[in-house]
Amino acid sequence: MEKIGNFFTENKGFTLIEVVAVLVMIGIISAVIMARANTMNADVIGDIAMVKSHLRYAQGRAMANDANTWSIVFAGSSYALFRGAVKKALPGGNGLDISFAPSLSSNETVAFDWWGAPYYTDAGLTLPKTDGSLALGGGNTIIITPVTGFIP
């Protein structure tokens, strides 16, 4: 190894400053990626909470009013409230159809009888939902307890 002034010509390895600089850059990139991922998760979580709230609303209306069926009909990435065959406005919604995150979607109908019991795909209330789940796509599921209609 030849010494020129105070420097060696064959330095091997990284200096402490180089290592710290690379770690700082990795940290900044990771923070940006995590912030974006958390924002997307927050939107999905918020939309699922909104769907649960609207399901509870439909259930409460079915139990409080009359023998008319109240249901939530999902069509892709939107849904609407129905009283019998008439579309009704949901609280907090702009118009009659509510849209949610594109990663969530369903084509099911959730109807409630006057006891609050859930029925799926059958507004005539002859086929009770027995598996207790509403799949919303992307691995997201809302649990609706059969018979009682409890939505945790």
Image (spheres, rainbow, N blue to C red):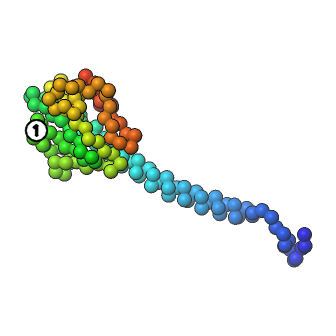
Q: Quadrant of the N terminus?
A: bottom right
x and y, in percent, of residue 108 in the image: 25, 38
Choose top left, top right, bottom left or bottom right for residue 47. Answer: top left
Q: Nearer the viewer, residue 119 or 28?
A: 119
Residue 106 visible in this rendered orientation of the protein:
yes
On screen, residue 2 versus residue 36, left or right, reads: right
Choose top left, top right, bottom left or bottom right for residue 147. Answer: top left
x and y, in percent, of residue 116 in the image: 20, 26
Crowd band around label 1 with a 10 angstrom C-alpha radius: few (<14), some (14–19), many (20+) = few
Location of residue 95 with respect to 72 vertically, above or below: below
Q: Residue furthest bottom?
A: 5
- Residue drawn at 12 percent across, 37 percent down: 83
Q: Residue furthest right?
A: 2
Which type of secondary structure does the marked residue at label 1 adopt?
loop
The residue singled out by tag 1 in the image is 85
On screen, residue 137 versus residue 124, left or right, reads: right
Q: Quadrant of the C terminus?
A: top left
Location of residue 6 with respect to 129 vertically, above or below: below
Identity, as a three-letter code, of the amino acid under mark 1: Ala
On screen, residue 145 versus residue 119, left or right, reads: right
Q: Nearer the viewer, residue 15 or 123?
A: 123
Total numbered circles:
1
- Residue drawn at 29 percent across, 42 percent down: 106
- Residue drawn at 64 percent across, 61 percent down: 22
Residue 60 visible in this rendered orientation of the protein:
no
x and y, in percent, of residue 61 in the image: 15, 33
